[in-house]
Image (cartoon, helix red, strand yellow):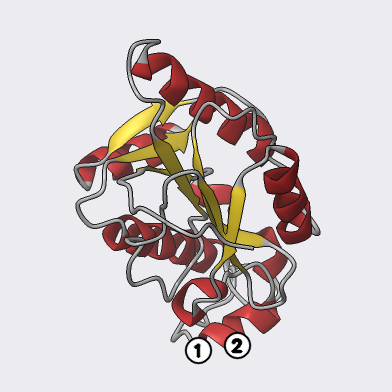
Amino acid sequence: MTGSNLTAVTPTVLIPVKGFSYAKGRLADRLSEQARSELARSMATRVVQAAGSLPLRIVCNDREVEAWARALGAKVLQIAADGLNPAVSAAVAALEAAAGPADSPGHVLIAHADLPLADTLTGLAESGTVTIVPDRHLDGTNVLSLPLGTGFQFRYGPGSFTAHCEEAMRCGLDLRVRRIAALAVDVDTPDDLDAAGLSLPVAADAS
């Protein structure tokens, strides 16, 4: 469902990034540890670039990731929380607290850091609306945009696309689903690598 008079708003982009050195373990049969780390860094850099001029925070709890983010000129939101849902919830709460009671609560856009084809994150935030860009399987939530201050509960994990659609309805918010090819491919498995069509190093770990 969609709202009838959608008004574009400027969101703050949150990109949760875990340590590059232990990212993408499910690709171990295809890529060396170094190659997986380089892939994770490259994909995260592309997502940062896709944010363009939008206000941006890298959500992390890793010194290497923090150094990488600052080298790109990105601001860092340090969140000491285990798991994606607690980290995103804490980051969003920090944005809400920073806005202050007298200010408009604003809007947030959460983008996964493993979108190798991402080109732009602009145009995905609309007033009073939850916008979801699902993965290519219509299972996960690759990009999620929503108003702050609504009590929205994040439900990342298997089936998160449906769960987030249900959560938008629970909160009484308009819902818009955007199927965008450049944002639909995330990389967790060897099949995802093939779908992305990436040119990757093939060196194996030294034994």
Q: Is residue 135 left or right of residue 125?
A: right
Indicate the position of residue 174 as horizontal and vertical percent values: 59, 51
Residue type at mark 2 is: Asp
* Residue 201 appears in the picture as rendered: no
SS category of the residue bearing label 2: helix
Indicate the position of residue 190 as horizontal and vertical percent values: 68, 79
Indicate the position of residue 68 as horizontal and vertical percent values: 31, 44
**Image position of 74 with respect to 76: above or below:** below
| Residue at screen point 37% across, 16% down | 98
Residue matched to label 2: 194
Residue matched to label 1: 197
Q: Give the alpha-carbon distance from disc 1 to disc 2, as whole Å.
A: 5 Å
SS category of the residue bearing label 1: loop
Residue 39: assigned label: none
Give yes or no for contact between labels 1 and 2 (Cβ–Cβ under 8 Å): yes
| Residue at screen point 35% across, 25% down | 104
Residue type at mark 1 is: Gly
**Image position of 162 with respect to 166: above or below:** below
Indicate the position of residue 16 as horizontal and vertical percent values: 50, 43
Q: Is residue 61 left or right of residue 53?
A: right
Q: Residue farthest to the front?
A: 4
| Residue at screen point 72% across, 47% down | 169
**Image position of 61 with respect to 129: above or below:** above
